[in-house]
Amino acid sequence: MNWDWQAESEPPPPCGVLGLGAAARRLWQRTQVADKAGTVWRIAAHADLLLIAGEADTLPWCEGALYVAPRTEAAELWLPTTQRPTAPLDLLLRAVQRRHGARSYLLLREPAQLVALDRLQPATPDSFAAIAARWN
């Protein structure tokens, strides 16, 4: 399947915020000073990525971070809110799931990545500490 990326004509409200590289560390630091009273976040991380999913109005802002969200036509495929593939999203999701398994994914343009969203865990002080320990 050949496709490219284009600007999103009607950006959806964000369901997550994503930091990559140095922005992941800045986002993690921002979460440590954010007022989290009453917020319900789910998080996932690897060596170069931090994803925080939650209600749009609870998501922290961070320089260099991307907001992400699913689209109506492919609810299990999350994308940056400002971009979308030129391919029909439902067909792209089916192709991804056929190759990688039937679950939800975050698809990124730069750097090209596919992140399985079943790795999202409840955000707790222990989960944030575990991320910090892995990054140190």
Image (spheres, grey):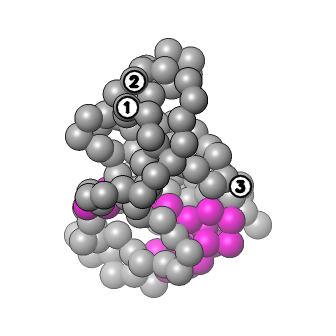
Q: Is residue 28 magenta?
A: yes
Label drawn at residue 88: 1
Dots 2 and 1: beta carbons under 8 Å? yes
> Considering only order in the chain, which callout, 1 or 3, is on the residue closer to the N terminus?
3
Quadrant of the image for the C terminus?
bottom right
Vertical relation: 18 (above or below) 63:
above
Task: Measure the alpha-carbon separation of dots 3 and 1.
Answer: 31 Å
Could you say where residue 70 lies in the image, as x and y percent from the top left?
33, 45
- Quadrant of the rendered structure where residue 23 is? bottom right
Could you say where residue 42 lies in the image, as x and y percent from the top left?
39, 53
Residue under label 3: 47
Quadrant of the image for the N terminus?
top right
* Mark 1: few/some/many CA within 10 Å (<14, 14-19, 20+): few
Q: Judge whether residue 4 can be spotted in this image.
A: yes
**Nearer the viewer's eye, disc 3 or disc 1?**
1
Q: Residue at x 53, y 80 (%)?
A: 63
Could you say where residue 10 lies in the image, as x and y percent from the top left?
26, 58
* Mark 3: few/some/many CA within 10 Å (<14, 14-19, 20+): few
Which secondary structure, mark 3?
loop
- Quadrant of the rendered structure where residue 87 is? top left
Farthest-out residue, right = 136
Residue under label 2: 91
> What span is colored magenta in the figure?
13-32
Residue 25 vs residue 54: left or right? right
Residue 35 vs residue 6: left or right? left
Which secondary structure, mark 1?
loop
Q: Is residue 3 magenta?
A: no
| Dot 2 amino acid type | Leu
